[in-house]
Image (spheres, rainbow, N blue to C red):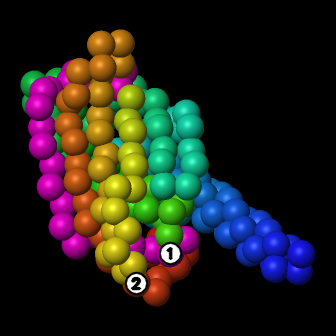
Amino acid sequence: MHYEGSKRKIKESQNMEGRDSLKKSLSWLHGVINGKIGHGLEVIILQGLRVIHAEKGFMRFDFVVPNVVSDVDGNWSFGALASLLDIIGIVTIYSFANRVISTVDFNVSYYSTIKIQEHVEIESKVNANRGKLMHVVVEVRRKGNGEVIAEGKLWMASNKLTFAQVSKL
């Protein structure tokens, strides 16, 4: 019986840790969205991002592409889209690993353009965990018909920085 009780305590501790990392990652993201931490660029890129669902290693967002991220043709700028994919990848990894991660390989595939003020859904998921090296995929789809607009694949390596330290960089 003592063994079963110990297993239960370990599992409860791991669940608490998972909730803690999720809570920290979402708190950091909301701080960036609201301009309380980070740089002005992130605030502009994430303007209007809403979290729809979040769990350890998986997140879903709702987003209306703001005017400020427009290219000369009125489309969502590729650079702004890539930055959003990177930020969401970092937040999703943190929710899973409870540590800050640096992007070491970033590949973005653009399948279609999207106009400013269009509605998209963004989904991110940790696909691989190799200890200090993790992989996350972030996919952007047109709301309504589900057409894939872009997909970011990120390999990330852990480091010892905290979110507070990264926000000051």
Mark 2 / mark 1, whichever is N-terminal: 1
Q: Which residues are magenta?
A: 98-120
Left or right of 58 on screen, residue 86: left
User: Would you identify the image quadrant in which residue 148 lies?
Assistant: top left
Amino acid type of disc 1?
Arg
Whether residue 41 is visible here, answered yes or no, is no
| Residue tagged 2 | 159
**Circle number at residue 99:** 1
Task: Estimate the x, y position of residue 33 in percent, counting from the top left.
Answer: 51, 48
> Disc 2 to disc 1, how far (Cα)?
7 Å
Q: Is residue 75 above or below residue 5?
A: above
Q: Residue furthest front?
A: 1
Local secondary structure at mark 1: loop
Residue in view at x 47 percent, y 83 percent:
161
Task: Estimate the x, y position of residue 11 in percent, counting from the top left.
Answer: 72, 68
Q: Is residue 71 above or below residue 88?
A: above
**Circle number at residue 3:** none
In magenta stretch: residue 101:
yes
**In-front residue for pair 57/110:** 57
Residue in view at x 51 percent, y 63 percent:
96
Q: Residues within 10 Å of mark 1 (few under 14, many from 20)?
A: many
Task: Estimate the x, y position of residue 133 in percent, counting from the top left.
Answer: 32, 75
* Pointers 2 and 1 in contact (C-beta within 8 Å): yes
**Image quarter hosting the N terminus:** bottom right
In magenta stretch: residue 4:
no
Whether residue 123 is visible here, answered yes or no, is yes
